[in-house]
Amino acid sequence: MSPDEINAMFGLVLVLTLLVATFFIGGALERRHYASIRQREQNYRNFLAINFSHLSPDWQIESTELARGSIVISVDYFKRFVALLKAIFGGRLTTYEPLLDRARREALLRMIEDAKSKGCNAVINVRLETSRLANATSGNRERLAGVEMLAYGTAIRTRPGVD
Amino acid sequence: MNPTRKFPIAVSNTEQIPGHRIVEFYGIVTGNTVRAKHVGRDIMAGLKNIVGGELVGYTELLTESRDEATERMIKQAQSVGANAVVNVRFATSSVAQGAAELFAYGTAVKVERE
């Protein structure tokens, strides 16, 4: 085999190994993250987080704070590869959907945790914001480094004895 | 609450501070910060990009930056004599390769307990 062929072979083996490895590792990480999200969503089921800004006047509100939660998340090599292939034909990029869903739910959970740590018992006027981070190290080709999801709202503390 | 603040200031992304009445408007106040990513964090994020998942370094970086932008907005509000900032919004824009601007803006007001 010529050195060129060896090089090409090596490249192919590397890509295949990465694909197989990230298929398992990325998948496992995603499942673990989803399990944690579902668990915490279950725990905070009674915590009110709504995107209403006007409240009924009989809510006795003691104080307000800004609550915030954010996460930067990225997709694994395998999923990016699949999305790249699918993007040729168009349609649903199913490998990217869980990524954004996870990030959004995680950001909301962190916002709730922030509100709780500030002693508040509800969050109103919740807003969600998405922004993409481009990777600086990839030269002039703007590659996606990650997606940032931000959830914020006004955390309120109601007077004791009031629902 | 930040100890450097002169007095507590209510920050909210609703149009009104619940339980309070707006008595005076001071206009828009803003706070921003432009951050470039850290080389070490960039390398770590590059590795994490292969397996996917949370890029913790970047999450921290953006959280710190947003704290700073909020703090600057609050300082500006205090300098005009406001005791609350309402209708706060966060926004992000990318200025150059690898740098991002994070800013927070809202309306500085004076509120009174109803």
Image (cartoon, helix red, strand yellow):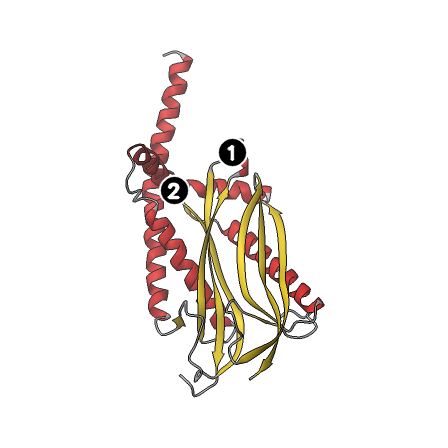
Q: Report the residue at 40% width, 43% height from top.
A: B51
Query: In which image quadrant can residue A56 be found?
Result: bottom left
Amino acid tagged 1: Ser
Residue A149 screen position, x and y as percent: 45, 54
Q: Are labels 2 and 1 assigned to the same chain?
A: yes
Instruction: Write the residue at 53% across / 60% down.
Output: B89
Q: CA distance from mark 2 to mark 1?
A: 17 Å
Going from N to C along the chain, the mark reached first, 2 or 1, is 2
Q: Nearer the viewer, mark 2 or mark 1?
A: 1
The residue singled out by tag 1 in the image is A138
Residue at x 41% of width, y 19% of height: A7
Q: Could you tell me if the residues under marks 2 and 1 are in contact, i.e. CB atoms within 8 Å? A: no
Name the secondary structure under disc 1.
helix
Does A44 appear above or below A94?
Answer: below
Subunit under mark 2: A
The chain under label 1 reads A
- Judged from this view, the residue extending furthest toward the bottom is A161
Q: Secondary structure at mark 2?
A: loop
Residue type beneath disc 2: Asp
Rendering quarter of residue A126: bottom left
- Residue A67: image location, x then y, percent: 50, 67
* Residue beneath disc 2: A76
